[in-house]
Amino acid sequence: MYWFALKYGCQAAFKLKSSGDASETDPSNFIKKQAIDAVTDINMLRVFKAFLETTPQLFVQIYILMQHGKTNCYQYAAIFMSLCGISFSMADYQMSLQKSLPDKGEFRVPSKFMYLFYKLLTITSWVLSISLITLLSVRISVILLIFLWICGFTWTLKQCTTFCKSKKMEYLYRTVVGIILIFTFFNIKERRTKVCISIYYATHTVVTLGILFVYMFWKPSIIKEIHFTIVIILTILHLVLGIIFLVVYYKHFHPTTYCRPQACLDEVDGTTGQKDRVKTSRFQNFLMP
């Protein structure tokens, strides 16, 4: 992927420099599009890495922090940077995705910040919630995560995605998307997501509140400790602010707000192919180059 991005990027840069002002049908524009597509694929792989590698490490960090109670500024900094890294990977992919889709509205600067804060706040709230339930019972936490993954994986199966060359790699793709869906919403079909995203975050809200109620009635002695009180307050605060940023983003700052009425479908988080590619798509060979 990196090789293709570098190759197409260099070709596009040299062709544009040599040809000056290029028309839309100029080959340099096609090469530029290929370079943007390759960068988008790289950013998608970064999203996969963030949720497969960074998120488990983040859980361990928070669990150790709350379990032992011995903290320092380096631990807080590491946790904050991990959360920011996950959120930035989602934002980077979203921005590069917009560039690769020809009929989408411009991803403006306010939209970037709204999307980034929406992801950062909702993911932080959910990670803190899972960390709290892990502290109560590791077994219950594992069961909850497996159940949520099964729900996400089942949803991807119902979407009938066709992004990979073989069925085995397609199931691998759906498995990874199911893991991402444990922590944040990830659209994999080019359709409106108002109902899906509402159900998704309503479920997260109910589960988060359920975890907090369990803490209050099952382990009230733990709540008396100051750092647990702070964690619970932060969990609720991040959840409320995250939902607010989510609503404001999709109502006023989503790029489809600025596009034509006939092209106002939500962009697909799991594909960057053009709409006019009916028979073939570059994402059919995404995991099998």
Image (spheres, rainbow, N blue to C red):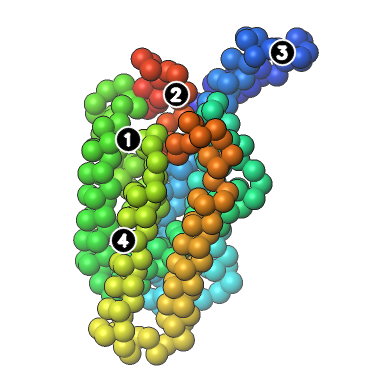
What separation in Å lies between label 3 and label 1 (alpha carbons)? 37 Å
What separation in Å lies between label 4 and label 2 (alpha carbons)? 32 Å
Percent coordinates x, y for residue 168 in the rendering: 24, 28
What separation in Å lies between label 3 and label 4 (alpha carbons)? 50 Å
- Please tell me in which quadrant of the rendered image residue 216 appears: bottom left
Residue 172 in sight from this viewpoint? no
Foreground: disc 4 or disc 1: 4
Image height of 41 relative to 54, above or below = above
Of the two numbered discs 4 and 1 on the same chain, state the one appearing first in sequence.
1
Mark 2 lies on residue: 275
In which quadrant of the rendered image does the C terminus lie? top left
Residue drawn at the location 49% of the way across and 72% of the way down:
237
Mark 3 lies on residue: 22
The crowding category of the residue bearing disc 3, from other C-alpha atoms within 10 Å (few below 14, some 14 to 19, many at least 20), is some
Mark 4 lies on residue: 203
What separation in Å lies between label 4 and label 1 (alpha carbons)? 24 Å
Of the two numbered discs 3 and 1 on the same chain, state the one appearing first in sequence.
3
Of the two numbered discs 2 and 1 on the same chain, state the one appearing first in sequence.
1
What separation in Å lies between label 2 and label 1 (alpha carbons)? 21 Å
The crowding category of the residue bearing disc 4, from other C-alpha atoms within 10 Å (few below 14, some 14 to 19, many at least 20), is few
- Please tell me in which quadrant of the rendered image residue 178 appears: top left
**For this rendering, which residue is in front, 110 or 135?**
110
The crowding category of the residue bearing disc 1, from other C-alpha atoms within 10 Å (few below 14, some 14 to 19, many at least 20), is many
Q: Which type of secondary structure does the marked residue at label 4 adopt?
A: helix
The three-letter code of the residue at mark 4 reads Thr
- Please tell me in which quadrant of the rendered image residue 123 appears: bottom left
Residue drawn at the location 28% of the way across and 40% of the way down:
156
What separation in Å lies between label 3 and label 2 (alpha carbons)? 23 Å
Mark 1 lies on residue: 173
